[in-house]
Image (cartoon, rainbow, N blue to C red):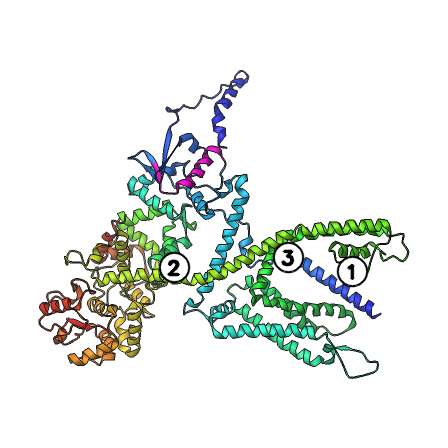
Amino acid sequence: MAAGVATWLPFARAAAVGWLPLAQQRLPPAPGVKASRGDEVLVVNVSGRRFETWKNTLDRYPDTLLGSSEKEFFYDADSGEYFFDRDPDMFRHVLNFYRTGRLHCPRQECIQAFDEELAFYGLVPELVGDCCLEEYRDRKKENAERLAEDEEAEQAGDGPSLPAGSSLRQQLWRAFENPHTSTAALVFYYVTGFFIAVSVIANVVETIPCHGPARRPPREQPCGERFPLAFFCMDTACVLIFTGEYLLRLFAAPSRCRFLRSVMSLIDVVAILPYYIGLLVPKNEDVSGAFVTLRVFRVFRIFKFSRHSQGLRILGYTLKSCASELGFLLFSLTMAIIIFATVMFYAEKGTNKTNFTSIPAAFWYTIVTMTTLGYGDMVPSTIAGKIFGSICSLSGVLVIALPVPVIVSNFSRIYHQNQRADKRRAQQKVRLARIRLAKSGTTNAFLQYKQNGGLEDSSSGGEQALCVRNRSAFEQQHHHLLHCLEKTTCHEFTDELTFSEALGAVSLGGRTSRSTSVSSQPVGPGSLLSSCCPRRAKRRAIRLANSTASVSHGSMQELDTLAGLQRSPAPQSRSSLNAKPHDSLDLNCDSRDFVAAIISIPTPPANTPDESQPSSPGGGGSGASSTLRNSSLGTPCLLPKTVKISSL
Amino acid sequence: MLTLEWESEGLQTVGIVVIICASLKLLHLLGLIDFSEDNVEDELEMATVRHRPEALELLEAQSKFTKKELQILYRGFKNECPSGVVNEDTFKEIYSQFFPQGDSTTYAHFLFNAFDTDHNGAVSFEDFIKGLSILLRGTVQELNWAFNLYDINDGYITKEEMLDIMKAIYDMMGKCTYPVLKEDAPRQHVETFFQKMDKNKDGVVTIDEFIESCQKDENIMRSMQLFENVI
């Protein structure tokens, strides 16, 4: 029921009194009236600004947030009001909708923000009143166009990040759509462009009269007929290239049906079909007329340039968006032409030797006059003809001038949008870099958290780094989630550096691959604390070593030689760490004297290696000296499980 | 004579061009050919699905949450999805923000299907609460829910289904893992799982086998309790 009708209910019920005498049966009893017929004032607190309204006002539209029971989710029992954490300025418009039944669009607010508020409060955009509807739609369309360009630019920017496992087809399609992704694509792009130009120029030059050798009677031949073989070869070559390109595109298209129906593919087909039809159709007199048509169609090859030229696409898009204005122009011109041609024909009918032989003949005069061309090949001679002729030319100017500004404004809007799009493409790169940075920031936060020993139980080690404790609740839960994933898959998150090194290590020793399999460990769904990762301690130590990332590879070698560590040669060290997970890395404990960024994770002698919880005091990031000291205190003897790894 | 010949041919050309344009326009009108490369011009305003949840009292009775908890949950939900429903793309986006390193779309797809109990393509607030209520407050229900997550269609978990899920989970880890992720790590994981769960060795895991094996496994039971406090 409409909003305000509910208020007229008492009047409607009064009408029932008129039926009382006429009723043949007893009228049904009235529904029980609810106890509280009084209306109550609701307080809606939107970000601190209090709005008060009758409950009935809100109940007018029961399929919105405020009118339904959904608002109970936002009810604050302590203060007795409904609290919404939204924009109070926008809420004013929403509330006015309930009061007046018309939704007005604020002029100075962003249309996207307004839309979001509407979506939140459950109001459909169609409710915008007529007074504001036009502006609302225009602004929304503008925004949508801008967003579409943003997406396009983003996709173009995301080009290089195609997953490695993409098929040949996907790679081919990407090469076609973004020529800048690989040199081969770029070469192909330029080659096709060149051949389009060659084909178009050949078409043009074909018709230029060549001065042939003098013959009787001397006549000029167009070049096409003088060198038929040369032009035929050139045409063949171009068509072959175009055919090949079209077939490749067809093969690579992700959705072949959609590709077949798109404009560009139609243009491609139209560009190459005339040649094949010309091959098939025998040269006889009957179909020579069609043959002329086919040669005309060859000029459509020039539209293939629109893949190469942004400007052409803008023009095409403008024309498409002004299609209705162009249609109006055409229609009104046609009407005017017919009217004036008829008038001129009948006005000039009486004259001798007149050019206005028929109404279609007068069309030419009318068009030439209305567009103010005025060739002068047909001129009226009677006075009536001249009068109508002048009216014709004056009205022509007016009729043409009317739709033109609309088309021009459309074009300038689209053109400026494109200029903005180019600027935005540059900004997009910065934006993407920032997004990537944020993503890696999340990961790094997690890695940092792990590095700072946040993964141990809080009961075992009293001193946790401050940074571990001061994480927000959300971060804690997020890190817990990532940790759960690690436990499930028995693989750990690392950063790029470690990964590339581990990758190198894997390629070095084939034995490493065996060790990374987790087949020997019992894994089940949701098993978090299972002993699936006995090497956790050592692995973390390795990662710790890497994430400090301050010491170069060279220093590792140095330390080796200096310390006289007994182990496999330095480049193999990482692989050996991987290969022998359960073996002891008998790094010489004596090397603990080295301050230069040696980080050691001593395992408490009492614990089994599976449960080893290395207490990393003060976090790995803190000075190496403290850890060294600890190690010297903690494990005097060379335990099989003591791991000391010098950082790379 | 020559001009007449050419004139008639020219007129034929014009006639053919006009006919072709008219037929193209007809096809466009019939919707067979699409002239627009980008559909920005479409005035098609998608009918936004707006969904309002059931009353607070009803939800409170149906789930194991208190009123206050429901209010908090709803406010967050409504903020993110003003239309009241989460569709699959939004779901995948949410997950990609939690697991930035890897590709979480496949697993998000499975999760979405598990949450979307009525399979209408959108997760409403009720579905959300129903799922959370099972996950957070009950133990056998959790196992049921997990079984439903793994089982895509027929009531058993086959090796292929499990492999898909396992691959999805491993995809979430991303590329930079330590140790380096091998190609058959998911498959081996599935083998281990089946060894443990498939008691009668018939190649599929039924729900009873699943629940029984999980209840026997101490680790699993212990980790169930980790998710008690999510709010």
Mark 2 falls within which chain?
B
Magenta: predominant secondary structure element?
A: helix
Cα distance in 3D space between marks 1 and 3: 39 Å
Query: Mark 2 — residue?
Result: B105
Asked whether, in this view, residue A353 is left or right of residue A446, the answer is: right
Give the SS element for disc 1.
Answer: loop
Query: Does A26 lie within the magenta span?
Result: no
Query: Mark 3 — residue?
Result: B27
**A309 and B36: which is toward the camera:** A309
Asked whether, in this view, residue A623 is left or right of residue B27, the answer is: left
Mark 1 falls within which chain?
A
**A547 and A535: which is toward the camera:** A547
Q: Residue at x 41, y 69 (%)?
A: A165
Is A590 placed above or below A350 here?
below
Query: Does A100 lie within the magenta span?
Result: yes
- Magenta stretch in the rendered image: A82-101
- Give the numbered dot on residue A375: 1
